């Protein structure tokens, strides 16, 4: 009897040991699809950084300099890199990307590659180095530093030739060598076109697929800054999200296969079907997550006229959910003013956003919950169980057996708790696996659908329309091609929205359009260009061969003004949007004098109102807007024309 009992005991004990051994020896799931590198993982963990634009455009009130600007106009007498970086840190950003050279070609470090640099400005008697001061500010404040050296240089006489490529690469080597560890090397897609080019004043077209020899240019980054990710329209590490509105798609894949606009061609920076970047590519060839870029102001450079248009903390919070909350990173543009400081309005907006962010995500209301999974990989609760969802490790995870793709997790909170944000994350070291989830709450004895989402990835924030109070929830993975590897589950409650303090009122400088009349067109929609309604559009006839288009307006009586404005269509279409213009005035409606001509820079990616200051105040009864070129080369469209005092 004793022998039999002992035998059974040993047998049961052996089975438990064997079961335990089998559970703990269960192998991890096989990775799925393209995977992130170590540098990309660090980038994902940052979640937010800022992009700082300061240069000659700050003084000329432009978005893109032509390349003919005199460096002597740049003299930020109060420049304080620490003030700028500290404001970004207060908002929760983990690093800054400094525009070391924009398209105008002026380098804000003392480069040896061109005389068009900070040494030839009055700032610090030509002995300053802005990039170094940003480096020191980042080190002092525990922030990361990245750089943006524009591939397009509208000042260089060598642009478009092989010699410029060597100059550009040497500029990269300088910043990689002299400014410490960088987290990102940022490359714009804008390149090739009109420019000063050392006085040539011409259009230089390049083959964007071959001119920069990107594989060998990127190799410099890989060698000199191996920890930095490379950003561009085609990555190779981080892709442009395809808009400058700060949001990724509701469905957002970290994997991506870039495609050229023309079949059979090689995609490149500035030559890609950019709208595909909003969602990415399910099962794409590369792990190339999205960066969602947007400026704190309407433009990327500082314009005093936009002081009343700084985004509020609540608006920034909305953008956070639509970028970081969809697996992308948020890159927010900051614009120091002519003194070299962020305006107090900008600083306060950043501070308010940081406070909102911190208060919302300070406490995970799911802490202390009991988690019950319908399946745990190999029965190994310690290694693959749902308890891993509530620890502080982004890469510990709940996983299922290979055959189980749609498991269920029941979450029982210690007591009823109120929340309006649900956070989910995957262990992306194993790829982006989950394609859809649903969340339910138990109410009145029945499960009720609360929300759903697609594409989890590095981070997914599901923001509910209203707070919900519940004790029990159920998470259902409704679609996944493989076993899951979910690493995080969180519940959070946003603070009640406070009424934003009003920005000090600024007198509207726009002139009334009462009595204005289009006089050179009898088309029914002609008045739409001056009707004060941005939703209505005037369009010229579309032709296969583009010709400049005039719109003449009788102001009713002579008016004095110092600027004109052009608002492109706001319906997400590019048809007829002017990117080159001439603006003319007349006293009799017959003889016109040109008082401004130029380009609307970056209007494709950022179609905001363009305000063009004239060299001096003028008086006229008639104005003529000439659309000299459009984005699609087929006619001209106008949402609104206006004048400023």
Image (cartoon, rainbow, N blue to C red):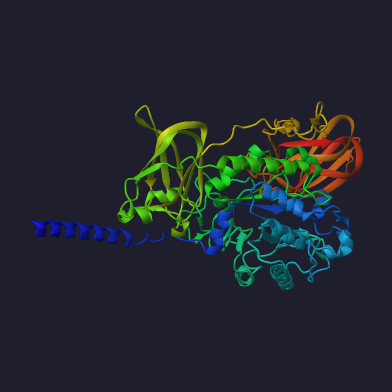
Residue 498, x across and y down, in percent: 65, 31
Q: What residue occupies the far front of the structure in this picture?
A: 2
Residue lying farthest left?
A: 1
User: Does residue 630 appear anywhere in the picture?
Assistant: no
Q: Hey, which quadrant is residue 572 in on the image?
A: top right
Q: Measured from the top left, where is residue 320 in percent x and y?
A: 59, 44
Q: Which sits in the foreground, 234 or 37?
A: 37
Q: Is residue 61 above or below residue 266?
A: above
Q: Is residue 467 left or right of residue 317?
A: left
**Residue 564, horizontal then vertical, whole percent:** 82, 40
Q: Residue 128 is drawn in which quadrant?
A: bottom right
* Residue 528: x %, y % from top left: 72, 32
The one of 121 and 618 positioned closer to us in this rendering = 121
| Residue appearing at x 84%, y 68% in the figure | 115
Q: Is residue 625 above or below residue 262?
A: above
Q: Is residue 558 left or right of residue 470?
A: right
Vertical position of residue 587 compared to residue 213: above or below: above
Residue occupying image coordinates x 83% and y 50%:
338
Residue drawn at 63 percent across, 43 percent down = 573
């Amino acid at each position: 009897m004793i022998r039999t009992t002992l035998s059974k005991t040993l047998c049961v004990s052996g089975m438990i040991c064997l079961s335990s051994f089998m559970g703990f020896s269960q192998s991890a799931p096989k990775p799925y699809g393209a995977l992130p590198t170590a540098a990309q993982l660090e980038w994902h963990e940052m979640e937010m950084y800022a992009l700082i634009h300061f240069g000659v455009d700050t003084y000329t009130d432009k978005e893109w300099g032509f390349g003919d600007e005199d460096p002597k106009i740049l003299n930020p007498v109060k420049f304080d890199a620490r003030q700028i970086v500290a404001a970004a840190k207060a908002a929760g950003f983990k690093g800054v990307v400094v525009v070391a050279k924009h398209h105008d070609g002026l380098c804000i470090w003392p480069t040896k590659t061109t005389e068009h640099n900070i040494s030839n400005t009055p700032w610090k008697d030509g002995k300053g180095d802005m990039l170094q001061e940003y480096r020191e500010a980042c080190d002092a404040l525990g922030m990361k530093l990245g750089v943006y050296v524009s591939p397009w240089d509208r000042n260089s006489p060598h642009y478009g030739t092989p010699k410029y490529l060597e100059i550009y690469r040497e500029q990269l080597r300088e910043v990689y060598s002299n400014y410490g560890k960088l987290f990102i090397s940022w490359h714009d897609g804008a390149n090739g076109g009109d420019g000063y080019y050392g006085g040539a004043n011409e259009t230089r077209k390049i083959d964007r697929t071959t001119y920069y020899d990107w594989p060998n240019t990127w190799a410099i980054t890989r060698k000199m800054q191996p920890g930095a990710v490379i950003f561009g329209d085609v990555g190779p590490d981080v892709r442009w999200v395809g808009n400058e509105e700060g949001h990724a798609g509701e469905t957002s894949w970290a994997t991506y296969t870039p495609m050229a606009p023309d079949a059979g061609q090689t995609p490149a920076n500035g030559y890609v079907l950019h709208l595909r970047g909003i969602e990415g590519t399910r099962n794409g060839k590369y792990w190339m997550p999205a960066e969602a870029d947007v400026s704190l102001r309407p433009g990327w450079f500082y314009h005093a006229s936009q002081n009343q248009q700084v985004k509020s903390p609540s608006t920034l919070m909305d953008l956070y959910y639509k970028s970081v909350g969809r697996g992308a990173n948020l890159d927010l543009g900051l614009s120091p003013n002519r003194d070299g400081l962020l305006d107090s309005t900008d600083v306060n907006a950043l501070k308010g956003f940081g406070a909102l962010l911190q208060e919302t995500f300070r406490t995970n209301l799911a802490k202390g919950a009991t988690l019950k999974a319908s399946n745990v990989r190999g029965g190994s609760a310690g290694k693959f169980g749902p308890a891993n969802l509530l620890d502080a490790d982004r890469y510990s995870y709940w996983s299922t057996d290979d055959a189980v793709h749609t498991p269920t997790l029941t979450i029982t909170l210690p007591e009823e708790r109120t929340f309006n944000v649900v956070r989910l994350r995957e262990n992306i070291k194993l790829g982006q696996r989950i394609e859809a989830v649903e969340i339910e709450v138990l109410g009145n004895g029945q499960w009720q659908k609360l929300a759903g989402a697609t594409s989890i990835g590095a981070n997914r924030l599901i923001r509910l329309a209203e707070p919900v109070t519940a004790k029990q929830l159920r998470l259902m993975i409704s679609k996944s091609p493989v076993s899951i590897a979910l690493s995080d589950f969180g519940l959070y409650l946003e603070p009640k929205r406070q009424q934003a303090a009003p920005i000090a009122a600024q007198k509207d400088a726009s002139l009334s359009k009462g009595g204005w009349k289009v006089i050179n067109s009898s088309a029914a929609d002609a008045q739409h260009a001056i009707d004060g309604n941005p939703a209505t559009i005037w369009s010229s006839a579309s032709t296969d061969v583009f010709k400049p288009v005039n719109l003449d307006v009788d102001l009713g009586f002579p008016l004095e003004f110092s600027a004109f404005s052009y608002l492109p269509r706001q319906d997400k279409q590019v048809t007829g949007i002017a990117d080159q213009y001439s603006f003319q005035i007349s006293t009799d409606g017959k003889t016109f004098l040109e008082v401004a001509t130029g380009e609307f820079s970056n209007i494709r990616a950022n179609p905001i109102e363009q305000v063009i200051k004239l060299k001096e105040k003028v008086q006229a009864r008639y104005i003529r807007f000439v659309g000299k070129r459009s984005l699609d080369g087929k006619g001209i469209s106008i949402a609104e024309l206006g004048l400023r005092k």
